[in-house]
């Protein structure tokens, strides 16, 4: 097991609040995934700095979900390595990756419909020795679901279910949160609620990697944007530069204009 020299990680990032120097929390090295003859992720060297909100965009089929699934361990790479918190994750299973401090929220809500909001939040906490009462109160407050704590999840709106699932991931106090299209299918108000939830968690030092197509949302939350195209990193930079880049517009933004 090797550790690249450029990984220098503290367990809880504080850079968001301080504006100080950053260090790498997640890094992929020549990460590749082949599906038969198709290379979905092609030799990607990618890194996320602690305390940032990184958005990953790109046309349909660019390899965004595959990259996320390689990071969570749902897929095994054909080649390459993944490092998190200075540890080589490449051979680690998904549950062990969660224990190292990575939480993920997939696109469609995965809440327990027949359990109450509070019972849903208790499920991930069973895996930890965290102070359940305090974490529950904080999470209900943060997700603006305190008034609905006794309600079954089946009664929640789509936006509320998404907030609940983010809340379930937050109870584990992850270093890095992966979100796959968190505002897909949401109203303008629901999207604004998710943006402010992410910003508030970010203000407390949480690091995010967010796959998203909604450019208004990306503009609202992102520190830096990575553009993936045909399995490769095409561009990386602040949102203003990405949106002004003619090649990015041609391969991606233009098709959505
Ligand atoms: N399990 C699989 N088996 C075979 N091919 C796959 C599999 N998963 C993804 N692919 C292919 O890999 C490529 C990348 O797919 P991926 O879903 O990662 O793209 P994406 O950028 O997330 O697209 P979208 O924005 O449409 O969700 C596509 O050509 C897709 O058809």
Image (cartoon, rainbow, N blue to C red):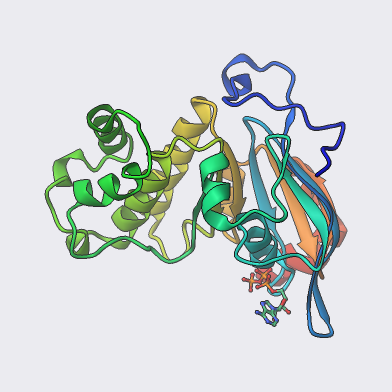
For the N terminus, the image quarter is top right
**Residue 80 image offset from top left, x and y in percent:** 84, 57
Residue 140 appears left or right of 231 = left
Residue 28 appears left or right of 73 = right
Residue 184 appears left or right of 139 = right
Up-down relation of residue 199 to residue 35 (above or below): above
**Residue 216 image offset from top left, x and y in percent:** 56, 51
* 254 or 39, nearer to the observer: 39
* 76 or 255, nearer to the observer: 76
Up-down relation of residue 57 to residue 24 (above or below): below
Tell me the residue at 72%/68% (across/down): 63
Q: Is residue 178 at least partly visible in the picture?
A: no
Q: Residue furthest front?
A: 1
Task: Answer with the quarter of the image where residue 248 lies.
Answer: bottom right
Task: Answer with the quarter of the image where residue 240 lies.
Answer: top right
Up-down relation of residue 257 to residue 209 (above or below): below
Tell me the residue at 12%/48% (across/down): 150
**Residue 243 image offset from top left, x and y in percent:** 75, 51
């Amino acid at each position: 097991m090797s550790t690249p020299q450029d990984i220098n990680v503290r367990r809880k990032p504080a850079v968001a609040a301080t504006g100080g120097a950053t260090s790498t929390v997640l890094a992929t090295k020549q990460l590749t995934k082949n599906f038969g003859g198709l290379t979905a992720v092609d030799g990607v060297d990618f890194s996320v700095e602690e305390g940032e909100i990184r958005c990953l965009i790109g046309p349909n089929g660019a390899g965004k979900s595959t990259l996320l699934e390689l990071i969570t361990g749902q897929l095994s790479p054909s080649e390459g390595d993944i490092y998190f918190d200075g540890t080589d994750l490449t051979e680690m299973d998904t549950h062990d990756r969660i224990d190292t401090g990575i939480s993920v929220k997939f696109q469609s809500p995965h809440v327990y419909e027949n359990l109450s909001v509070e019972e849903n939040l208790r499920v991930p906490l069973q895996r930890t020795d965290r102070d359940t009462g305090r974490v529950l109160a904080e999470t209900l407050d943060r997700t603006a679901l305190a008034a609905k704590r006794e309600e079954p999840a089946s009664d929640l709106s789509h936006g509320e279910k998404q907030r609940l699932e983010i809340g379930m991931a937050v109870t584990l106090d992850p270093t890095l949160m992966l979100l796959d299209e968190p505002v897909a299918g949401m109203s303008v108000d629901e999207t604004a609620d998710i943006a402010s939830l992410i910003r508030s968690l970010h203000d407390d030092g949480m690091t995010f990697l967010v796959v998203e197509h909604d450019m208004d949302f990306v503009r609202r939350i992102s520190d830096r944007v990575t553009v993936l195209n045909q399995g490769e990193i095409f561009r990386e930079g602040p949102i203003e530069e990405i949106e002004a880049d003619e090649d990015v517009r041609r391969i991606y933004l233009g098709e959505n204009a």
